[in-house]
Structures are given as structure tokens and as C-alpha cells.
Amino acid sequence: MLGFHLANVRNDGVAFGLLGGAGTVVLILTLLTMAVLLGYFAVRASDPGVWFAVGLVIGGATGNLIDRARLGAAIDFIDPPAWPAFNLADVAIVVGVALLGLSMLVPHGGSTRE
């Protein structure tokens, strides 16, 4: 059948269910990744392109962590055909990481004039 379906999938791992059942490891990896990302943001805070991207990633990761704290797993509810279920926090993380990647391709430091 074509199209997206609503589902109630509990994902206690990371992307595609990897590390499922490793709650403490997932928590530690997520918090470490968020700390590194915030450090990167502190260095590049003058770059306006980084603000939105970091906000999306941190917001998405925080949303999934809140689900894990409340329910023991992130709740994935968007179920497309031929792809694992996901949620809006996952969308925010993916878009944020893509925007961060693009921002890394743009030279930092403002004007290119001498």
C-alpha cells in the first residue's frame, strides 16, 4: 500500500533501532554528542547558519530523551513504506545535521574582502 501510515513504534535504540536495549549507552552517547555539538556551536556562534541547525539537532535529541525518560523509548509514529518508522524529533535531527554539513562548506569569518 502506498503512502504514510500512523504507527506506535517504541524505539529504545538509536537510528533504525541500533543499540536497542542499551539504554544507558544510548543516554551517554546522546549526551556526549550534544556536548560536542554545543562546543562546536560556542566556537561558531557568530555564524548565523549554525544557530538554526544546532537548535534543530539539540531540540530533536532533547525530545527523544524526554520520551526515553518518560516512557523508556522514543515513540516513532510516522511509518512510510519501505522505511523504518520515525518521529518529528528524528526529522529535526536529520535536517539539522544536513544544515550543519552545509554550513561547514561555507568559509567562516565573514567577508572574503582583504
Image (cartoon, helix red, strand yellow):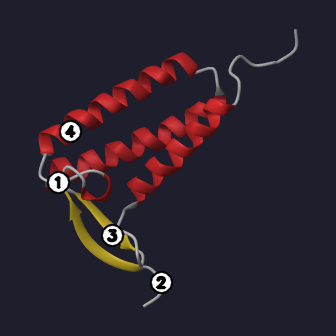
Q: Which residue is mark 4?
A: 27
Q: Position of residue 66 (x, y in %)?
A: 25, 47
Which label sits on residue 3?
2
Q: Looking at the picture, which amino acid does disc 2 mark?
A: Gly
Residue, x 53% and y 16% (percent of image)? Answer: 43
Q: Looking at the picture, which amino acid does disc 3 mark?
A: Phe
3D distance between C-alphas at marks 4 and 1: 12 Å
Q: Position of residue 104 (x, y in %)?
A: 61, 30
3D distance between C-alphas at marks 4 and 3: 21 Å
3D distance between C-alphas at marks 2 and 3: 14 Å
Mark 2 and mark 3 in contact? Answer it, CB < 8 Å.
no
Which label sits on residue 77?
3
Q: Looking at the picture, which amino acid does disc 1 mark?
A: Gly
Residue, x 44% and y 41% (percent of image)? Answer: 57
Q: Position of residue 27 (x, y in %)?
A: 20, 39
Mark 4 and mark 1 in contact? Answer it, CB < 8 Å.
no
3D distance between C-alphas at marks 4 and 2: 33 Å
State whether residue 88 is above or below residue 26: below
Please, what secondary structure does the residue beneath circle 4 have? helix
Q: Which residue is mark 1?
A: 20
Q: Determine crowd level at label 1: few under 14, some 14-19, many 20+ residues with C-alpha closer than 10 A.
A: some
The quarter of the rendered structure image containing the C terminus is: top right
State whether residue 112 is above or below residue 89: above
Q: Determine crowd level at label 2: few under 14, some 14-19, many 20+ residues with C-alpha closer than 10 A.
A: few
Q: Is residue 39 left or right of residue 15?
A: right
Q: Earlier in the sequence, mark 4 or mark 1?
A: 1
Instruction: Look at discs 3 and 1 and give the one toward the viewer.
Output: 1
Which label sits on residue 33?
none
Q: Quadrant of residue 51?
A: top right
Instruction: Look at discs 2 and 3 and give the one toward the viewer.
Output: 2
